[in-house]
């Protein structure tokens, strides 16, 4: 199968299935000399780890993988060598027997039937390669990309801005606190909202149902000029990276769909004198900032130097314990109750995945931009 690799200069190839021996990634193109330790990768993996939240957290799956990364190549004495970085994470807590009865059934909301329609065979154990377990490799690679971007002064932060139908305050709203988002298990930047969402999630768990949500991501420290103006637009690359994540059904940048209902006089970001010195511009190009950021930090597919801001929508988890109707291989209508260990809301665990894919896009563009002009 194709489609397992991502990037142009800073590239990754992920591998592994949900219930196979392990998952991992091969990173190629990471510059030499970047500080990268096993703990840097492990820290990011802990953020997405199934069952990684506090005891009883209703958002999390009961699958408790340790997610201990092994760096097999490409790093020596805490520094990248410029050679391919191979990272392996072994699967240890899989219970394949939980999926035996699903072997001949097509689960609603899953890729079971389309996968078979394409390949004629599928791994029914936990969804195989279609499982969220595949994101282990992305997050591990993202740790390397983040380390590279940090040395460029670029910071990526994401949080849960909505879940289970409940909206959290955003930047500029009363009560918004990113430190709170980084500290609570739901990744919500507002304690009272986090408590309301958790209560809603627990109710859905008791009903055998699930919830979706929205993750907001903001990138600061981006220089102007990243992205190509036609097919390689920064926003197009970001959107493609986000939609490549399982369960993602929508992406909006800056004002997003709100802009479709507004006026140009309200949506245009007026240039303004720079708030701080800016280096790296071509001769004769003045430094400037923008009074607002409705564009989300991208104009004409190219970064403006304003914060890159976008939102990613995740559908409700399709593995629910409520009775559903489906078909088996013989075309017979069957009742289905999905057992096993599944998330009620995937959004909190997807935050590091969104950050990782963002980091991979930006690391690639930083390297590509070095060849854009003399």
Image (cartoon, rainbow, N blue to C red):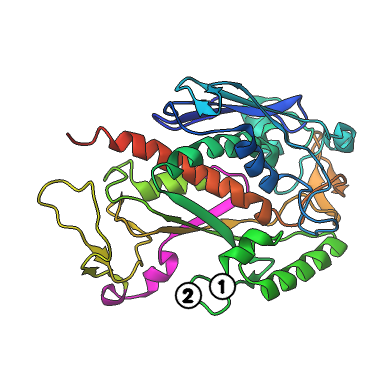
Left or right: residue 157 versus residue 111 is left
> At x 60% / y 64%, what residue is drawn?
179
Left or right: residue 5 versus residue 21 is left
Checking the image for residue 215, the label placed there is: none
Decide: is 200 above or below 351: below
Classify the position of the C terminus by image quarter: top left
**158 in magenta:** no
Q: Residues within 10 Å of mark 2 (few under 14, many from 20)?
A: few
> At x 36% / y 51%, what residue is drawn?
222
Residue 163 in view: yes
Checking the image for residue 176, the label placed there is: 1
Disc 2 marks which residue? Answer: 172
- Disc 2 from disc 1: Cα separation: 7 Å
Could you say whether the residue bearing mark 1 is in a helix, strand or loop? loop
Decide: is 314 above or below 133: below
Left or right: residue 134 versus residue 307 is right
Q: Which residues are magenta?
A: 243-266
Left or right: residue 151 versus residue 88 is left
Residue 236 location (% of width, % of height): 39, 47
Residue 328 location (% of width, % of height): 81, 38
Quadrant assignment, res 23: top right
Residue 37 location (% of width, % of height): 59, 33
């Amino acid at each position: 199968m194709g489609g397992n690799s991502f990037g142009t200069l800073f590239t990754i190839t992920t591998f592994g299935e949900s219930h196979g021996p392990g998952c991992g990634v091969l990173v190629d193109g990471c510059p030499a000399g970047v500080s990268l330790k096993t703990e840097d990768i492990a820290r990011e993996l802990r953020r997405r780890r199934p069952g990684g939240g506090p005891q009883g957290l209703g958002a999390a799956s009961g699958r408790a993988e340790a997610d201990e990364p092994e760096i097999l190549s490409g790093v020596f004495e805490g520094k990248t060598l410029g050679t391919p970085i191979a990272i392996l994470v072994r699967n240890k807590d899989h219970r394949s027997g939980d999926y035996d009865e699903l072997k001949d059934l097509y689960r609603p909301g899953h890729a079971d039937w389309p996968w078979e329609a394409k390949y004629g065979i599928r791994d029914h154990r936990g969804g195989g390669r279609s499982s969220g377990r595949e994101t282990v490799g992305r997050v591990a690679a993202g740790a390397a990309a983040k380390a590279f971007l940090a040395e460029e002064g670029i910071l990526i932060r994401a949080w849960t801005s909505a879940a289970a139908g409940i909206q959290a305050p955003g930047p500029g709203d009363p009560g918004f606190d990113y430190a709170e988002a980084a500290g609570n298990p739901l990744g919500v930047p507002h304690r009272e909202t986090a408590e309301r969402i958790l209560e809603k999630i627990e109710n859905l768990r008791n009903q055998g149902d699930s919830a979706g949500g929205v993750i907001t991501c903001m990138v600061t420290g981006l220089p102007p000029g990243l992205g190509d103006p036609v097919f390689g637009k920064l926003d197009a690359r970001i959107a493609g990276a986000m939609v490549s994540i399982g369960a993602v059904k929508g992406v909006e940048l800056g004002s997003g769909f709100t802009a479709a209902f507004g006026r140009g006089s309200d949506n245009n970001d007026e240039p303004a004198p720079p708030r701080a010195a800016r280096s790296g511009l071509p001769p004769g190009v003045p430094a400037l900032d923008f009074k607002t950021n409705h564009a989300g930090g991208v104009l004409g597919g190219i970064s403006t130097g304003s914060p890159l801001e976008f939102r990613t929508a995740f559908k409700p988890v399709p593995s629910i314990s409520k009775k559903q109707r489906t078909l088996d291989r013989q075309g017979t209508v069957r009742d289905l109750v999905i057992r096993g260990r599944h998330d009620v809301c995937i959004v909190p665990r997807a935050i590091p995945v969104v950050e990782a894919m963002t980091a991979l896009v930006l690391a690639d563009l930083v390297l590509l931009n070095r060849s854009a002009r003399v």
